[in-house]
Image (cartoon, helix red, strand yellow):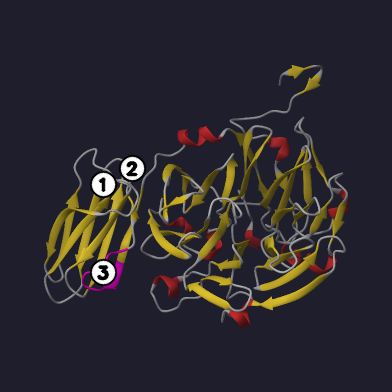
Amino acid sequence: MTTTDDAVQPLQVSGVFPSLAQIADFGPPRTEIGVGALMPWNGALYVQNYTSHKARSGSGVSLRRIQPDMRMEVVPETVGVDGTYTNRFVHYPTGRLIIGPQVIEQDHTIHVVPELQEHRLCGTAHHLRTPETHVYVLTMEGLVFELDVLTLETALVWDLNDELTTEGEWKVHYKDCYTAYGRFLVCSNEYGEAEWAGERARGRLAEFDGESWRILEHKPFTAIAGRGEFAGTIFASGWDRASAILEVYSHADQQWTRYRLPKASHTFDHKWQTEWPRIRETEHERLLLDHHGMYYELSPWAYGGRVWGVRPISTHLWVLGDFCSWRGMLVMGADNASPSTGHNVTTAEPQSGLWFGKTDDLWSYGKAAGWGGPWWEDEVSAGEPSDPYLMTGFDRKVLHLQNHGGADVTVTIQIDPRGDAAFGTHKVLTVAPGALESYVFPAGFSAHWLRLVSDQDSVLTAQLFYT
């Protein structure tokens, strides 16, 4: 302990303050308490934690408020407001913060919205028709409410299980929503054995353009973000069995482009194990992407309709509900330990911690490494390039190319050294039927993106390992 101006400073270990741990009731039932949302607001840091599945799965969660001297208090108006909440949104026209089922005024007056309290809230976004007074609020079960931020009145707008042909509670897992450029976007991350095997596709990335809904992807997605209508882009992070995915909307081109990224770990390959990777601005006009066990730096700009500045930072095993900048620090909120109502027999106490540091501290974490690729037993058309796959920021690289078809296949490795989609040929490989060919890239070799082109219609696997 140290003292400054006669004030006792709380103990901290490597950026973790034990006194700021989020701890839920011992139970029964005993379930997790994760950090679902972090929001700085007029001097204080609000921490919205959550149980695993609505109020009945545990108690003792609440909105909590941290002051600059690192004292934490339970917000009294939210005692008993138990549930699963990960939404956060600043509504600038009214000067109010929406976090969980609460609306907070500038003087920290708290309003709880009873109609939202019983729902698992996972996203809040600008309203398309009346953005000056209303927002959309998305639930994990696929309901979209509109909320009048001033009167606190709510109305159900859509049941996405009808609009997007999803299957409702326990068979759907909506995660996030976002509004920009006249479109309201939502995503869900349903993924299990059937999705991995290619037998089912319950995940969704979809948009409403003011007239109708359109499904953009039948894959699991976890986050949608951007910088409003400032930089001309929208980002959405997801995955399939082949790799992690970053979808980028370019307003200049009015189109989406799919990029592929390595997976740092397969421990994120399930809908319950991607809670809640985020895309968020942590340094001014710079985005931090947490995706499948890897941190990336991400620029909000797209030049020539192509995304630039994607670079891996480090790897981690955290379940990070949210992160933000507060008083010059990077703050991260975890989901650390859950008894899981008895499934985890070596954990008794639901608790999770907060980490305080600086963005550049992330470079001291696990080395940037991972695996993935554009194809996993995929039907490939002759002459059609694969999705671009990230190549920059990693050390040693090897490509494993497998031919599941019945004829020889010649595959061209193309690279994009500038990041502007000007791909050129690097290497040509021929793979016999049923064979696997490996290619080790020269030491120090790199480019922004890599893609593959087959000369034949075939079924191919292409996976790259970066170490």
Give the residue at mark 2.
Answer: 394
In the image, what residue occupies the spot 79% across and 74% down? 155
Whether residue 333 appears in this view of the structure is no
Residue 271 image offset from top left, x and y in percent: 53, 65
- The three-letter amino acid code for the residue at tag 1 is Lys
> SS for tag 1?
strand
| Pair 3/2: label in front | 3
Q: Residues within 10 Å of mark 1 (few under 14, many from 20)?
A: many
Give the extent of the magenta segment: 376-386
Whether residue 305 appears in this view of the structure is yes
Horizontal placement of 224 versus 39: left or right?
A: left
385 inside magenta stretch:
yes
If you read the primary sequence from the N terminus, does the residue marked by circle 3 or circle 1 appear first? Answer: 3
- The three-letter amino acid code for the residue at tag 2 is Phe
In the image, what residue occupies the spot 43% across and 45% down? 309
If you read the primary sequence from the N terminus, does the residue marked by circle 3 or circle 2 appear first? Answer: 3
Q: Locate residue 369: give its quadrant.
A: top left
Residue 339 image offset from top left, x and y in percent: 64, 56
- As measured in the structure, the alpha-carbon distance from the residue carrying label 3 to the one carrying label 2 is 26 Å
- As measured in the structure, the alpha-carbon distance from the residue carrying label 3 to the one carrying label 1 is 24 Å
Tell me whether circle 3 and circle 1 mark residues in contact (CB < 8 Å). no
- The three-letter amino acid code for the residue at tag 3 is Glu
Q: Nearer the viewer, residue 402 or 223?
A: 223
- As measured in the structure, the alpha-carbon distance from the residue carrying label 1 to the one carrying label 2 is 8 Å
Q: Is residue 88 above or below residue 72?
A: below
Give the residue at mark 1.
Answer: 397
Give the residue at mark 3.
Answer: 384
Tell me whether circle 1 and circle 2 mark residues in contact (CB < 8 Å). yes
Specify the label residue 414 is tagged with: none
| Pair 3/1: label in front | 3
